[in-house]
């Protein structure tokens, strides 16, 4: 009876062996055919033994519009090597295990491990041998490259054993999830064992090579006309003086001039807004992306959070093109690279989905180590796509900060973890923004905001769990539509007595020469159809001799990310104002006034946040109320400007989130910081419980972001959780300056 019960337990446990989707491992070269990888063969006396599904397992295959499940059969075809299950006996000349010296017979429920050197052993025997560090065949003394690994029975429920390579997660979530994936058609030269390394290399220079046509774009150019069709349009530059006329005998100090930039719609010859930037044609012509995701898998992410994270990552993977590359880094108590930087071809997507399905939540929260490893991967990569970015998500405080001598925990210096070469002020062309996502009420919003700010990325506050996919969708909607890079605006005083007083550009780096005659704004990357507004103040001198005075000359340059060419706009924008003896009526520019309101609101938010951090919530609320009243009295507000309405709604929302210390700590701080990030970069961020609240978030959302968020809200994987579908743009986009 005991023997029978033991067989039943082994059968149940070994039924959970990892299935590897079918692939061809034979190489075209003769030498590769002689190399056989390790395999596990298992004969089961009972068939159709059900396996339990993990609660973290999430189907990542899309559902067709008709509702029919598009996934392939859930039972994968056993691979020709690696881990497999077979009902046939192992083809070994010997029927005795060389370790325990007992027979290896059919029907006993034992797993048989066949090594690269063709010698076979009981799996339990050889796994125990390997566990103590021995990686040499006990028979022929050959050194194995692939080794078996078995989790201790005590780690699994019902004493079930599990088989996996040593670097795969040690729980059943991987097993159950992988069995539900469709069978990928992998490259014939790629081995499944290479997907997840048993060890991490010291240098992450094993990234997949870029396509040859990407490296040599000129090979695709047939003639000059074809080259023009694949080039981007020019950046649109407009200027607006505060007023159009100033009396000749008057001088003006801090006279405001608005500089408005608008990026081209898109690249690749897509000249219509109705054309989809995510189509196959667009993916082949737009700037490809290197995306590194750094994901928190600490114990607090267990359950619904990790399941929704898997779903969101599945959405990201499905929307990356074959020239885009993705890497996955996970962190809990420590950090490791789960998936190397690979192209998202059909095979690459399936491999990435396998990696995502392996995610399990346990351990502490070491944000610093995850960030350090993500930055290292970006720096070490051998090849570089034109666009690079890091996405960092965490739901908790960093539990690995270094304590000070007094015993208190000091805040981690995250800036030191980002190499100078990829920081926005690093002085090099390689700038990698880190877009951070604070998940839930317990994350360290201040640190996440600091990381994004120093790298040139945005900080998003994901308050509701179900919005994580929408937040990711909005972010990659921008990253997949970069049309210009290294954008720079240069200012030059056009009159000998005109001086530049200030340049208000948020977080963008600005400079003014010592004589105040020249200045510059370092704008960087712009998404398709993205807009930027900068307010420059100058002094207007007395000018009795002319009918008009030239104030500034504006020049703009940028780099085409596809052709790599540096483009300088030949047409210089010159700002002029009329001078007359008497100016009967001056009308303040609506465009200038609304941007003043935006900057005033952002300053009030920053001041209120500083007061709240000092513990003065009453003072913080007063600052926000005062700003709201001031905005309501402006020219734009009296004219019903929608931007002013949105700003006031946002200020009131912040007041509510500063009602008391508990509310501020749980959501107010993160909400304010995500708002500041959005205003400082003039870029959309997820805020609160949606990506389309009545706040200003939609004023910065580009058409490609809107498209991607709409896709996220209408395209589900498997059986989606119940949630209300929101319109992608509840707040109208800001009016285009005329």
Image: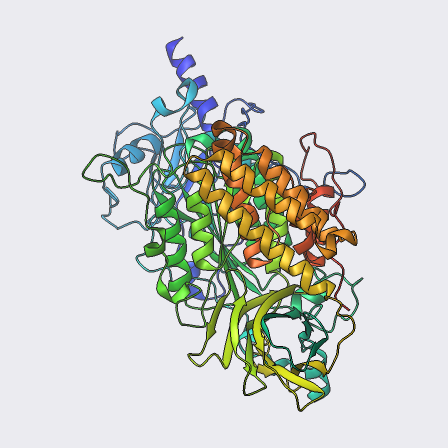
Can you say whether 398 is above or below 188 in the image?
above
Estimate the x, y position of residue 657 in percent, counting from the top left.
Answer: 56, 34
Using the rendered image of the protein, determine whether residue 348 is visible from the camera's viewpoint: yes
Looking at the picture, tell me which residue is in the foreground, 323 or 439: 439
Looking at the picture, tell me which residue is in the foreground, 246 or 69: 246
Q: Is residue 43 left or right of residue 203?
A: right
Estimate the x, y position of residue 627 in percent, counting from the top left.
Answer: 60, 46
Looking at the picture, tell me which residue is in the foreground, 590 or 182: 590
Quarter of the image where the N terminus is located: top left
Using the rendered image of the protein, determine whether residue 86 is visible from the camera's viewpoint: no
Q: Which corner quadrant of the image does residue 515 belong to?
A: bottom left
Q: Residue at x 34, y 22 (%)?
A: 154
Q: Is residue 731 left or right of residue 369?
A: right
Residue farthest toward the top in the current orientation of the protein:
1
Estimate the x, y position of residue 122 in percent, counting from the top left.
Answer: 34, 32
Q: Residue at x 55, y 48 (%)?
A: 604
């Amino acid at each position: 009876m005991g023997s029978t019960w033991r067989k039943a337990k082994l059968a149940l446990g070994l039924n959970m062996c990892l299935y590897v989707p079918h692939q061809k491992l034979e190489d075209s070269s003769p030498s590769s055919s002689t190399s056989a990888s390790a395999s596990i063969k298992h004969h089961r006396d009972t068939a159709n033994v059900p396996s339990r599904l993990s609660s973290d397992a999430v189907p990542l295959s899309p559902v067709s519009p008709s509702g029919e499940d598009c996934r392939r059969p859930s039972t994968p075809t056993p691979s020709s090597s690696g881990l497999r299950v077979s009902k046939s006996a192992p083809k070994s000349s010997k029927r005795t295990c060389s370790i325990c010296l007992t027979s290896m017979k059919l029907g006993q429920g034992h797993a048989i491990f066949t090594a690269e050197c063709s010698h076979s052993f009981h799996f339990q025997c050889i796994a125990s041998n390997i566990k103590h560090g021995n990686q040499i065949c006990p028979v022929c003394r050959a050194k194995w490259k692939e080794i078996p690994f078995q989790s201790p029975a005590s780690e699994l429920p019902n004493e079930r054993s599990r088989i996996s390579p040593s670097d795969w997660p040690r729980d059943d979530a991987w097993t159950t999830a992988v069995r539900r994936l469709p069978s990928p058609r992998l490259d014939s030269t790629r081995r499944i064992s290479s997907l997840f390394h048993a060890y991490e290399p010291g240098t992450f220079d094993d990234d997949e090579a870029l396509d040859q046509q990407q490296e040599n774009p000129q090979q695709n150019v047939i003639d000059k006309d074809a080259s023009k069709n694949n080039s981007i349009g020019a950046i649109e530059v407009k200027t607006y003086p505060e007023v159009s006329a100033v009396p000749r005998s008057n001088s003006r100090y801090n006279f405001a001039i608005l500089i408005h930039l608008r990026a081209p719609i898109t690249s690749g010859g897509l000249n219509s807004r109705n054309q989809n930037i995510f189509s196959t044609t667009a993916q082949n012509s737009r700037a490809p992306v290197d995306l590194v995701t750094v994901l928190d898998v600490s114990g607090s992410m267990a359950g619904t959070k990790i399941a929704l994270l898997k779903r969101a990552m599945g959405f990201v993977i499905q929307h990356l093109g074959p020239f885009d590359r993705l890497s996955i880094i996970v962190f809990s108590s420590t950090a490791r690279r789960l998936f190397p930087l690979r192209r998202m071809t059909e095979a690459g997507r399936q491999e990435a989905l396998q990696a995502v399905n392996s995610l399990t939540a346990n351990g502490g929260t070491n944000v610093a180590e995850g960030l350090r490893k993500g930055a290292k991967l970006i720096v070490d990569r051998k090849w570089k796509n034109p666009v690079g970015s890091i996405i960092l998500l965490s739901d908790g405080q960093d539990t690995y900060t270094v304590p000070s001598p007094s015993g208190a925990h000091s805040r981690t210096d995250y800036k030191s973890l980002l190499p100078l070469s990829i920081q926005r002020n690093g002085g090099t062309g390689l700038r990698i923004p880190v877009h951070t996502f604070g998940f839930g009420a317990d994350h360290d919003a201040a640190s996440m905001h600091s990381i994004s700010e120093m790298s040139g990325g945005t900080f998003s506050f994901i308050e509701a769990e179900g919005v994580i996919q929408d937040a990711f969708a909005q972010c990659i909607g921008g990253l997949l539509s970069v049309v210009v890079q290294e954008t720079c605006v240069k200012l030059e005083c056009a009159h000998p007595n005109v001086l530049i007083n200030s340049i208000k550009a948020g977080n963008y780096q600005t400079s003014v020469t010592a004589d105040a005659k020249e200045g510059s704004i370092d704008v960087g990357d712009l998404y398709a159809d993205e807009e930027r507004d900068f307010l420059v103040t100058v002094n207007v001198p007395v000018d009795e001799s002319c009918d008009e005075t030239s104030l500034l000359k504006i020049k703009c340059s940028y780099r085409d990310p596809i052709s790599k060419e540096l483009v300088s706009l030949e047409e210089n924008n010159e700002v002029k104002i009329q001078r007359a003896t008497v100016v009967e009526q001056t009308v303040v520019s609506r465009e200038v006034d609304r941007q003043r309101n935006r900057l005033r609101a952002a300053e009030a938010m920053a001041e209120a946040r500083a007061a709240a951090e000092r513990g003065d919530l009453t003072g913080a609320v007063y600052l926000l109320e005062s700003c709201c009243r001031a905005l309501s009295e402006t020219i734009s507000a009296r004219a019903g400007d929608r931007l002013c309405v949105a700003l006031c709604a946002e200020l009131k929302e912040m007041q509510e989130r500063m009602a008391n210390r508990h509310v501020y700590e749980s959501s107010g701080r993160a909400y304010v910081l995500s708002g500041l990030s959005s205003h400082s970069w003039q870029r959309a961020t997820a805020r609160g419980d949606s990506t389309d609240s009545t706040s200003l978030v939609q004023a910065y959302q580009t058409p490609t972001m809107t498209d991607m968020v709409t896709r996220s809200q209408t395209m589900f994987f498997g059986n989606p959780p119940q949630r209300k579908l929101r319109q992608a743009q509840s707040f109208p986009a800001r009016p285009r300056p005329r």
